[in-house]
Structures are given as structure tokens and as C-alpha cells.
Amino acid sequence: MSVFKQVADIQTADMLHLPVPKANFHTEVIKPSEIQQEMIKGLAERAEKIRGGGVDPHVDNMLRITNDGRKLALDMRLIQPLAPDDPDGKVAVCARNVYRIWEQTKEKRSTQLVFCDLSTPTTDGSFSVYDDLKKKLLDAGIPEDEIAFIHTADSEAKKKELFAKVRSGQVRVLMGSTQKMGAGTNVQDRLIALHDLDCPWRPSDLQQRLGRIVRQGNENEEVEIFRYVTEGTFDAYLYQLVENKQKFIAQIMTSKAPVRVADDVDETALSYSEIKALATGNPLIIEKCNLDMEVARLNMLKASHLNQVYALEELVHRKYPAEITRLTERIAGYEKDVELAKAHPKAQEGFCGMEVEGKHYAEKEDAGKAIIDVCTKMTGSDAVLLGQYQGFSMVLAYDGMSNEYRITLKGTLSHTVTLGADVFGNITRLDNALENLAGNLDAERAKLEEAKVQLENARTELATPFAREDELTEKTARLKELNILLNMDEKDKTLIDEAPDEGEEPPVRKVVGLER
């Protein structure tokens, strides 16, 4: 730190005493919706599967889970467009705060900034936090020309014009990301409030956001900083992570003189036993040390073999028989469902009709729209009976783990279909699921044959003994002999010296022992 301070000129805010407004921080804690809670549970289950090593990282990984967790904390519709609009979610609460401050500061024409890094304005009709927040502000009564996105200023000239409008109070609500609205954004003149809809990864990003409003040239003596946190989601973890990073940075970038100490690891202790054995000069102790390691290693190998035996016993006596029984039952169920599908064939041309919530739809488009309409009206995660299609009952449910709406076709077995936003595509997926029943039946029959082969292989391996059992027995016996010999050596021995030389004292008894 002393060397660092010789080349670094550190000037912190507590040293500069700049004339900036006082920041009043407000944390808006948002209660998660039922669907958000369901998906959070799903994220935990996904993480547990990944930790178990059974998931291909190309299919799912911790980075993807983290990204989904950040998005769902902001708004569920970012990852599930069919999710309903939560009237008490982050965007709605932020909109109410922005409108309240806009109304209270009409006379002064004070301005506000809204930061959001996890979304961008869209033009293709897909969901965007920016567009949704703007719509809510327009519905509340804020004129459209007083709301702007930083993304529309795609040149330096347009940025300069937009910033001038914000400084004059012509644009009173400016929304953007940290990257586009951070460093270089000088609009502080009338800023009265700042809203952080999400939490960035880096402390510097939060500092850049704060620096737009807590800045020289702001006419307001006090400003309001709103940070929106969805309870029980990744938000709390992210803010804690940023705080820990900032604490580490602050230990160096400070006006004080911090002390950081790291104790060295004493490596001599790692080889102490070996040095002691060699120092005694007793070959039995050296041999004992080597045997201790060998026997310990062999015992570990045997323990591993026993664990494998226990696992094989589980496979032979429980898992494979249960799997064979399950597959046999599924094959019987598939056979019945294949017959049911044949009894209600799909029309060669056109649409055979579908019943949704008790109403029959003869047109494919109408049926597809009815399915999506039911999805958008769902507010919970409980499964609901949707209707009938080609002799199968349809059950609709939301799955929090995969963040998907699904229809389950119920015959003798259940056949699940993932829904999308396409009206005709969902009907096609249902048709494909029914057409694939025969192929699934063949696949289950192949699995049954494979399970029978694996059962026989497991039985063969279970009968195989530990390959190094004789070596372990021999070395364990030798180690026991050495322990007995060394224990004898450690006992005090009384020896009589030979007859003394002339003029010496009479013979004496000397005690000779082996020092360990």
C-alpha cells in the first residue's frame, strides 16, 4: 500500500467536499407473485440437478439460471411472455412512484431517471420493461413528449438535443441502461429522483448511476434514490455481492491507510512425520510409515469397492426390477393410448375440432386463440382442466422450473406438450404428440430390453470380489507385527554392563530405551 500510494493520487468524496445534493435512499420491497415463487423453486431444482452433474452445460448451466433469476426478479414477462401483468410488481410500483413525483414537481418541472439493464425497447411487439413502463406512465396521465428512451438518441447530435431537453424540463422522465446513460450523461440540472429497477454486477455501475444525480449543478438540495427489490429473489444476493465488492475496493481506494495481512502457510508441517521417522534411524519406523500409507490407500480402495457393491445391490434388488415393472406398465399404457388415438383419428384435411373450457371450436385458429387466452388469465400455478382433443383430456399448468406453460394430454398415460405464443403452432404440437405415440411405444420397448441387459450385468459385477484383498490382508498383518515390535522396543530395557576395568566402580545397571 505504501508503494501504491507513491504513484496513486487518491481523491475520494469525503476529501473533496463537493457541493452536491443530499441523497435520500428508499428501498421498495416487492412481494413476489405466486408464479414468480414457483419459478424460484424451479431455479433451485435446476441448480441441484446441475450440481449433481447430470445436466449437459449446453442445455442448462449456472450462468443461465442466474440470468433467469435476475430477469424474473424484474418482471416474469421477460422470460415468459404469457405471464400476467402483476399490478404490484416492480414496473407497476416504479410507475406509481414516477407519476407521484412527476405530479408533485409540476411547477418546478423536475426530472427523473429510470435505469434498467436487463431490457431494451423493442419494435417487434415482444415484451419490454421500457415499453410497459412507458405505457403505464401514459395511462397515468404523463404526456408522451415528456417521456424518452436514451436508445432513441443514436448519434452525438441527438444525444446533445435530448440532454438539453432534460436539463430544461421539456423531457421529465428519461429511461436507459447504465452503459448508455452512465458516464458522459450531464442532465443533473433538474433531477429530483433516480430509480434503479435492477442491480448491475459491478459497484462502478451503481456509482455511475448515482453520479448522474448526486452531482454539481443540481438545483435540488435533496434528491430521492429508489431501489426496487423483489423479496425472496436474486435481488438481495446481487446487492450483497455488489456491496462486498465495493468494500474490497474501498480498502484500497481510500483516503485512510488500511492494513492488509495474509499469513504464509507453514509447509514444514506437511512433511514433519517423514522427517521424524528418518531422524530416528530405525528402519522399522520407516517401514511402518510406508505401510501405514499403503494400508490406508488399500482400505480406501476397498471402501470404494464396498460402496460400489452397495450401489449394485440397490440396482439389482430395487432399481432395475422397479424400472422393469415401470416400463412394462408404461408399455401397456402406450398400447391403450395408441388404440385411443386410432379411434379418434385426425382429419386428413382441415381440423377435427377441440373443446376448450366446455366450448367446442371447429376452427383451428379459434381453438389456438382460446388456449392462449386461458394461459394469459392464469394467476396461479395449479393445474386446470382445459378441455378435450381427439379423445384425450387436456390439462393446462405452469411449470416454474422450466418457465413454461404446458398442456398434458391424459389417456391411460399423460403426454405433455410445451406451449408457445403461436396460435397454430400449439395445435400442431398437440397433433405431433399424438402422432408420436407409436414411436414412443417402440422406444419404451427398447428401454425395457436395455434394462433387462443392465440387470444381468449388475448381477455379474456384484459377484466379483475385491481384486486386492490378498494384498491388503498381507500388508495389514505385517503392519500389526511392526506395531508389536515397536511397542516392545519402546518398553524400558534393563541391561548389565560387562565387568568394569581395573579401578572403575562396580558394575551398574543402565536403563536403555528407544526414544520415539
Image (spheres, helix red, strand yellow):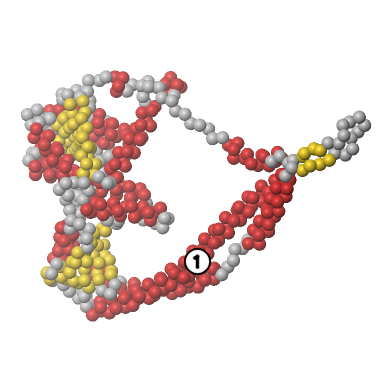
Asked where in the image residue 190 lies, by quadrant, the reply is top left
Q: Quadrant of residue 196?
A: top left
At x 32% / y 78%, what residue is drawn? 335
* Residue in the picture at 17% in, 40% down: 94
| Residue 297 place in picture, x, y as percent | 60, 53
Residue 188, position in %: x, y? 19, 27
- Visible in this render: residue 330? yes
Image vertical order of residue 503 relative to residue 382, above or below: above
Q: Which residue is drawn at 19% across and 23% down?
A: 217
Residue 145 in the figure: left or right of residue 242: left
Outermost residue, right direction? Answer: 502
Q: In which quarter of the image is the C terminus?
A: top right
Give 280 or 126, whichever is nearer the viewer: 280
Q: Looking at the picture, does residue 445 appear above or below residue 479?
A: below
- In screen coordinates, is 445 left or right of 97? right
Query: For the residue carrying disc 1, how many other residues have a C-alpha within 10 Å: few (<14), some (14-19), or many (20+)?
Result: many
Q: Of 33 and 169, which appears nearest the observer?
A: 33
Does any portion of residue 475 appear in the rendered image?
Answer: no
What residue is rendered at 9% in x and 28% in y?
A: 108
Q: Tell me the kind of residue under disc 1.
A: Leu
Can you name the residue that lies furthest to the front here?
506
Q: Position of residue 8 (x, y in %)?
A: 40, 22
Q: Position of residue 133 (x, y in %)?
A: 16, 43
**Image quadrant in which the N terminus is located:** top left
- In terms of depth relative to the viewer, which is nearer, 416 or 422? 416
The answer to whether residue 336 is above or below residue 132 is below
Dot 1: what SS? Answer: helix
Q: Is residue 349 above or below residue 500?
A: below
Say which residue label 1 marks. Answer: 312
Left or right of 516 on screen, residue 65 = left
